[in-house]
């Protein structure tokens, strides 16, 4: 179902104590100040999922996501975390295909298709990331690359299942660089993605899919980005680690 979503991607940051403080602060600010109905998600390191789940409580405005999961069901895969483990903790979301996973851990479209399948099999909602590096944008190959990334990892899904996916468009040149896509660039790419989904699944289905923007979202630019008709919220890295700033971003959704 299409909805406004603001997801914080904490990446590999914070000690447990710091994570508790951050989550407690944002929870309090959200309870006091946030009127809208946007879904708020903290995508936190694996070791903190259960503690933060207890801290946030059931039925809270804020829910949790993991930042990755294994493509395997279970077994001898030292250091990996499976989708069924996340499900057993009651974690509803998982980020898949973040550009850092693609770049540093060699995750490609085929592998990500497997991760998408196993996450869905266990009832998790994938937040599937796509995005082009700077050189691809500069050589004008960004539309083709994004379509390819979406096709390779998602187009095997049927009409009913694709609607369970959240997509995050995150241009790699905007991640952690302080260089945000303009709202026009974001809107244009979200339209490219939605049209591509519509071509395969029909407009009604494409209209049901939330497409988030990610890449240097902050309190100053969130409102303009989130007001674009095809931008359904954001996936926020650096700015999700500061309680006041992240709360302001949530209020912009
Ligand atoms: P950033 O990260 O907001 O720090 O640019 C976004 C992301 O990587 O999801």
Image (cartoon, rainbow, N blue to C red):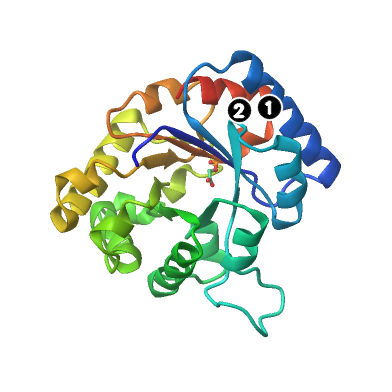
- The answer to which of 146 and 166 lies nearer the viewer is 166
Q: Is residue 147 above or below residue 228?
A: below
Q: Which residue is mark 2?
A: 246
**Callout 2: SS:** helix
Earlier-in-chain disc, 1 versus 2:
1
**Callout 1: SS:** helix
Callout 1–callout 2 Cβ contact below 8 Å: yes
* Mark 2 Cα-neighbour bin, 10 Å: few <14, some 14–19, many ≥20: many
Q: Which residue is mark 1?
A: 26
**Residue drawn at x 24%, y 52% as measured from the top left:** 143
Q: Quadrant of residue 64?
A: top right
* Mark 1 Cα-neighbour bin, 10 Å: few <14, some 14–19, many ≥20: many
Q: Is residue 125 left or right of residue 82?
A: left
Q: Quadrant of residue 2?
A: top left
- The answer to which of 131 and 179 lies nearer the viewer is 131
Q: CA distance from mark 1 to mark 2?
A: 8 Å
């Amino acid at each position: 179902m299409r909805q406004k979503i603001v997801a914080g991607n904490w990446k590999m940051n914070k000690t447990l104590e710091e994570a508790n403080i951050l989550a407690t602060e944002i929870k309090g600010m959200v309870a006091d100040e946030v009127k809208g109905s946007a879904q708020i998600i903290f995508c936190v390191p694996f070791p903190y999922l259960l503690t933060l789940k207890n801290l946030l409580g059931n039925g809270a405005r804020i829910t949790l996501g993991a930042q990755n999961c294994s493509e395997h069901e279970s077994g001898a895969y030292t250091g990996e975390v499976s989708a069924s483990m996340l499900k057993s903790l009651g974690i509803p979301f998982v980020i898949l295909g973040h550009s850092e996973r693609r770049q540093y851990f060699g995750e490609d479209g085929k592998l990500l298709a497997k991760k998408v399948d196993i996450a869905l099999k266990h009832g998790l909602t994938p937040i599937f990331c796509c995005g082009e590096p700077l050189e691809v944008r500069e050589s004008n190959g960004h539309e083709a690359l994004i379509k390819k990334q979406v096709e390779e990892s998602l187009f095997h899904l049927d009409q009913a299942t694709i609607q369970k996916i959240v997509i995050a468009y995150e241009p790699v040149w905007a991640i952690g660089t302080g260089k945000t896509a303009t709202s026009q660039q974001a809107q244009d790419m979200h339209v490219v993605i939605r049209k591509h989904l519509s071509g395969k699944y029909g407009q009604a289905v494409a209209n049901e899919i939330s497409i988030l923007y990610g890449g240097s979202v902050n309190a100053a630019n969130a409102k303009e980005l989130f007001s674009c008709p095809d931008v359904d919220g954001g996936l926020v890295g650096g700015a999700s680690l500061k309680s006041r700033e992240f709360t302001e971003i949530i209020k912009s959704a």
